[in-house]
């Protein structure tokens, strides 16, 4: 991975959105609910005030509006502060 988050930031690969259909109606991608969990791909070094608790490979839960969406090599990622992560699962 050539993206290295800085300070207390974390790079997360969101889990795939769940496929749902309602009575035979297929919901388009734009109407699917964003996943609230994902896998940590890379972490920064932390700050003098905040030690990094998460590590690459951890599965995490995060807030609905957490992070900034980025696309790299055709893959979608979120970059967020460690404090935006709610739990490690």
Image (tube, rainbow, N blue to C red):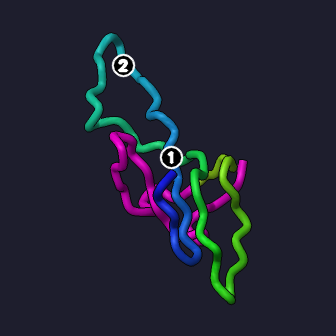
Residue at image location 44% in from the left, 55% down from the top: 78
x then y, percent, for residue 77: 43, 50
Residue at image location 60% in from the left, 63% down from the top: 43
Seen from this angle, which residue lies furthest front? Answer: 2
Along the viewing direction, whichever of 43 and 59 lies nearer the viewer: 43
Q: Quadrant of residue 23?
A: top left
Residue 22 vs 69, above or below: the answer is above
x then y, percent, for residue 38: 56, 46
Q: Earlier in the sequence, mark 2 or mark 1?
A: 1
Q: Which residue is mark 1?
A: 13
Residue 89: numbered disc: none
Residue 82 colored magenta? yes
Q: Quadrant of residue 24?
A: top left
x then y, percent, for residue 1: 51, 51
x then y, percent, for residue 18: 46, 29
| Element assignment for label 2 | strand
Residue at image location 37% in from the left, 19% down from the top: 21
| Element assignment for label 1 | strand
Number of on-image labels: 2
Seen from this angle, which residue lies furthest top? Answer: 24
Residue 54 colored magenta? no
Along the viewing direction, whichever of 87 and 40 lies nearer the viewer: 40
Query: Cα distance, mark 2 to mark 1?
Result: 27 Å
Mark 2 Cα-neighbour bin, 10 Å: few <14, some 14–19, many ≥20: few
Which segment did they paint magenta? 62-89
Q: Which residue is mark 2?
A: 22
Q: Are marks 2 and 1 in contact (CB under 8 Å)?
A: no
- What secondary structure is the stretch in magenta mostly built from? strand
Residue at image location 59% in from the left, 46% down from the top: 39
Residue 63 vs 16, above or below: the answer is below
Along the viewing direction, whichever of 9 and 31 lies nearer the viewer: 9
């Amino acid at each position: 991975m050539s993206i290295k988050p800085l300070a207390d930031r974390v790079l997360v690969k969101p889990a795939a959105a769940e496929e749902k259909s309602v009575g035979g109606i297929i919901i388009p991608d734009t109407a699917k609910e964003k996943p609230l969990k994902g896998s940590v791909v890379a972490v920064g070094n932390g700050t003098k005030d905040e030690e990094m608790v998460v590590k690459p490979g951890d599965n995490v839960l995060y807030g609905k509006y957490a992070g900034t969406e980025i696309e790299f090599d055709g893959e979608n990622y979120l970059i967020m502060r460690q404090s935006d992560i709610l739990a490690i699962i």
